[in-house]
Image (cartoon, rainbow, N blue to C red):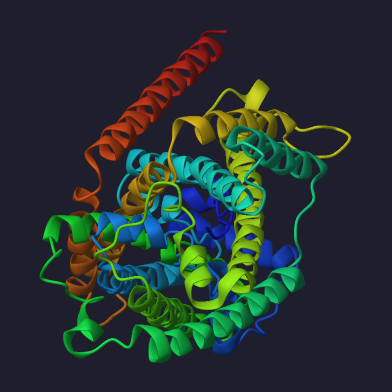
Amino acid sequence: MRPHLDRRPSSAARRGPALNSSASTASTASAPGLRRTLKLRHLLLFGIIIIQPTAPMSIYGVVSNAARGHVVTTILIAMVAMLFTAVSYGRMARVYPSAGSAYTYVGSELHPVAGYVVGWAMLMDYMLNPIICVIWCSAAAQNVIPQIPYAAWALAFVIVFTSLNLLGVQASSRVNAGLALGMGIVVVVFMAFAIHYIAVVAQPAGHTWLQPFYDPATFSTGRVLNGTSIAVLTYIGFDGISTMSEEVENPRRNVMLATVLTCFIIGVLSAIEVYVAQLVWPGRTPFPPSMVDTAYVHVGMRVGGKFLFQLLNGTLLVANLGSGIAAQFGAARLLYGMGRENALPRRFFGAVSARSGIPHNNVLLLGLITLGGAFVLTYARGAELLNFGAFIAFIGVNAAALVHYKFRSTEKVRLPALLPLLGMAICTFIWLHLDIDAKLLGASWVAVGLLIYLFMRRRRARLDTGAAQA
């Protein structure tokens, strides 16, 4: 999993473009602006670092079993959905250049309640991300030292995540770039071993080369779409490019172009990675439960022995460790923002440690939630639940782009209705093919969020009435 960035907007950003404009003018007058020095190539590098070159490896086994081996097909279908959505994100970043959040776009263009639902769904993503990272890290650690039980590894990783976030330890951009480069090298090493194995050992012939795309013996439209709903995790994080709008040369062109190109590049690289893996380990042979979460490293074992197994295992362990720490930190900040604005009880969620400056209540609460989730959820269920919230955000951003550019904006863009409508349709279609249990759990989460929203709104109304009478 890639780390989610905390893109929760300021209160000014949520009040809409008109107030944003005046706020921006005042801010510009009182403080120097950010320097526009980032070019298109910088944004592409940033996007690839966020998503990581090893993006499809952690979910490979889960998607393969769900889609009966058609992992390449699910990656490519997900890429199409994300390309349309990336256009909508890029276009909305023009309107809200400093916000960069689905929460802002939907709340300002559609309705504040719809924006709240998107924000609440995003909160579920933030909370689930460290859970599935703990699940994956624990499974990977057991590959190295199987004598230590899963429960002990899960507890250890939760303690690491929580302790580092309480200390405020965050990786620098240089460290992240270095890690991305290292992962890219590992991918190249794996590809070299895999190509040698395919040429010398597997020696596929005829239609075998096409089975990763379509295998008539195992193909099922419903299963492929269910796999696609998980494969979207490959692209999660691409919208982080929109947060850099204020530092980009020609942001109206480059932000959208970089967002779309990042999705395309990651999609092509991911398709190649899983295509080679499927030639090595054909999809007709499902992964057993004991290795499904870390299936890609077992593919590495087949082509490169213990050396490649440990190399891939260690690389993905570090990637998921970093993602889980960053995701828990982002979730704590998001809860703090909601508490500070009384969307959640301020006394608990809006508290910050005077010594460390960390919202320690939120970090500790998330640690407990992560620990519980690591024992209640499987990696596959957690991934589907995470994508439940992600697809709500994607559908909302496409809808916001449709409303803004088709009905409100005087700016002319190409296909203002068709592109977001296609994005909405494809994302909705994939979302409907999430597992039924994931949809029920996700719907329950949204229902709880709406109840909290109504409770807090009525509470504020009572307080305002009491203050007016006094």
Residue 454 vertical placement versus 374 (above, below): above
The image quarter containing residue 367 is top right
User: Which residue corresponds to the image point at 68% horizontal and 42% vertical from the top-left?
Assistant: 157
Is 412 in front, or is 160?
A: 160
Question: Within the image, what quadrant is residue 90 found in?
Answer: bottom left
Up-down relation of residue 184 to residue 407 (above or below): below
Q: Which residue is at 76% across, 33% downward?
A: 352
- Name the residue located 70 percent from the left edge and 38 percent from the top edge: 156
> Left or right: where does residue 216 sit relative to residue 50?
left
* Residue 214 in the image, given as x and y percentages of width and height: 17, 75
Percent across and percent down for residue 322 are: 66, 57
The image position of residue 191, as x and y in percent, is 50, 84
Q: Is residue 150 left or right of residue 72?
A: right
Please indicate, yes or no, whether residue 250 appears anywhere in the rendered image: no
- In which quadrant will I find the C terminus? top right
**Outermost residue, front direction?**
201
Tell me residue 350's x, y (percent): 66, 30
- Camera-side residue of 312 and 57: 312
Q: Taking 198 as reference, is 386 above or below it? A: above
- Whether residue 344 is visible to the viewer of this picture, yes or no, is yes
> Residue 192 or 134: which is nearer the viewer?
192
The part of the image, by quadrant, that contains residue 180 is: bottom right
Which residue is farthest right?
355
